[in-house]
Amino acid sequence: MSEQRKTGPKTRPDVPGVVAGTVLTGAATIWMLTDNGVLQTGDLGVTSALLLVAAGLLGLAASHRG
């Protein structure tokens, strides 16, 4: 006997959830690295910009996946 794969309705990706999770995880990482002295205060502008670009790219990738 062969097993039949059940396919349900297509689910849309949770783009706001992906972006929010990326931003919050990135912010926590930046805070941790700054608190431990790995990042200096002058580096926060570039780091924050890279975090927002990464969140945007992940959001775009998730929206095109579905």
Image (tube, rainbow, N blue to C red):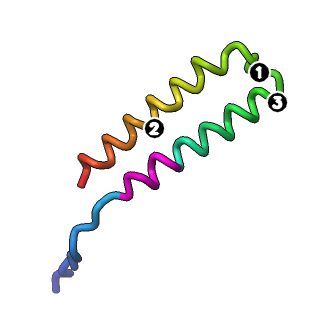
Earlier-in-chain disc, 2 versus 1? 1
**Is residue 59 found inside the magenta-colored segment of the image?**
no
State the extent of the magenta-drawn residues as a range: 14-20
Name which residue lies at 67% across and 15% down: 43
Would residue 29 be found to the left or right of residue 12 on screen? right
As measured in the structure, the alpha-carbon distance from the residue carrying label 2 to the one carrying label 1 is: 22 Å
Mark 2 neighbour density, 10 Å: few (under 14) some (14–19) many (20 or more):
many
> Quick one: which residue is furthest to the right in this view?
36
In the rendered structure, which amino acid carries the disc numbered 2? Ala
Q: How many marks?
A: 3
1 and 3 marks in contact (CB < 8 Å): no
Which label was assigned to residue 7? none
Q: Which residue is mark 3?
A: 35
Name which residue lies at 37% across and 43% down: 59
Q: Position of residue 1 (x, y in %)?
A: 16, 86
Q: Quadrant of residue 48?
A: top right
In the rendered structure, which amino acid carries the disc numbered 1? Val
Would residue 60 be found to the left or right of residue 41 on screen? left
As measured in the structure, the alpha-carbon distance from the residue carrying label 1 to the one carrying label 3 is: 8 Å
Q: Is residue 53 above or below residue 65?
A: above
Q: Position of residue 65 (x, y in %)?
A: 25, 50
Q: Which residue is mark 1?
A: 38
Helix or strand or loop: what does disc 1 sit on? loop
Which label was assigned to residue 55? 2
In the rendered structure, which amino acid carries the disc numbered 3? Asp
Would you say the magenta stretch is mainly helix, strand or loop? helix
As measured in the structure, the alpha-carbon distance from the residue carrying label 2 to the one carrying label 3 is: 23 Å
Mark 3 neighbour density, 10 Å: few (under 14) some (14–19) many (20 or more):
few
